[in-house]
Amino acid sequence: MKPTGSAKPEQLLADAKERFAAQDYFGAVHLLEELVESGKAFADAHHLLGLSRHLLGQSDNALDALDEALKLNPRYVEAHVHRALVLDALGRGDQAAVALNRARELGGETRQGIPATHAATLANLHASLGEAYAETGALDKAIAQYREALELGPAFHDLRYRLSRLLLEGGHPREALEELQRVIAARPKFYDARAALGLAAYVAGDLPGAKKTWTELQQERPDDVKVRAYLAILDRATAR
């Protein structure tokens, strides 16, 4: 397997999905554990990690990963189904039945008239199309696709974070700020989202808000070069 080094989270997840599709579950686990350790894993990464571990016979560890996926997205139908399978394999039939019933309840829900399971698939397709637009520089179209995705999957905080970055890149800092606040409300320890929140506040002209956010981050990670650079820029702007 090629070393991953500083691969982006989305690339790690894409590579893990390829390994999983090729039935290389060890390879998938290796990549997903690296992603989880980075602190940038969302519910889908934890879900795939749990499923991969289960297929390797590591059911106890699989359950931990699936529980984390559901902590991040309690309405994740597939995670409830696979959690039921793992619980059954562990001989915990009563709990498995509860998990399966919850999956059935959620599976009957709709998003914009579309069954929840299909809505999740469509949300990811919108996000993929959004990335295709972003790669060509068509940021307005990319942003529109991500908004469509979030209409169908409002709890997909990885997509919301990506939307916020596109909004920042497209010159919409106040809208980016709103999206980042929603991401951080759901995932308070998401360091990169908090750093981006400071950047959005700075670009929007809220210098005290930016300083507060970045100062808190610097206290958590004093060696973070990026945050130190942000604070240095802020100090120069304040001095002027």
Image (cartoon, rainbow, N blue to C red):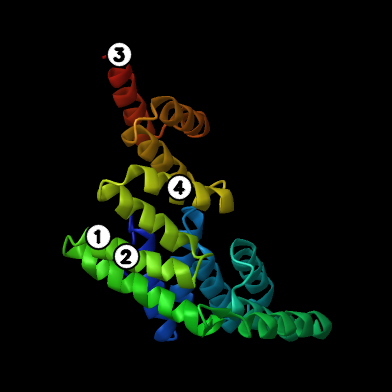
Q: Mark 4 points at which residue?
A: 178
Mark 1 or 3: the one toward you: 1
Q: Which residue is denoted by mark 2 in the rendering?
A: 144
The quadrant where residue 230 appears: top left
Q: Cα distance, mark 1 to mark 4?
A: 17 Å
Q: Which amino acid does label 4 sit on?
A: Glu
- The residue at 32%/51% (across/down) is 167
Q: Quadrant of residue 233?
A: top left
The foreground one among 179 and 10 is 179
| Residue identifier under label 3 | 239
Tell me which amino acid carries mark 3.
Ala
Q: What residue type is labelled 2?
A: Ala
User: Which numbered mark, 4 or 3, is in the foreground of this view?
Assistant: 4
Q: Quick one: quadrant of the N terminus?
A: bottom left
The outermost residue toward the top is 239
**128 versus 142 height, above or below:** below
Give the Cα distance between marks 4 and 2. 16 Å
Q: In this view, does 60 lie to the left or right of 210?
A: right
State the residue position of label 1: 140
Furthest toward the right, the residue is 94
Ranked by sequence position, the earlier of labels 4 and 2 is 2
Q: How far apart are marks 2 and 3 (CA)?
A: 38 Å
Q: How crowded is mark 3: few (under 14 residues within 10 Å), some or many (20 or more)?
A: few
Rate crowding at label 1 as few (under 14), some (14 to 19) or many (20 or more) other CA atoms within 10 Å: some
Q: How far apart are marks 1 and 3 (CA)?
A: 35 Å
Asked if the residue at tag 4 contacts the one at tag 1, i.e. Cβ–Cβ closer than 8 Å, the answer is: no
Instruction: Tell me which residue sits at (28%, 67%) in the image.
Output: 131
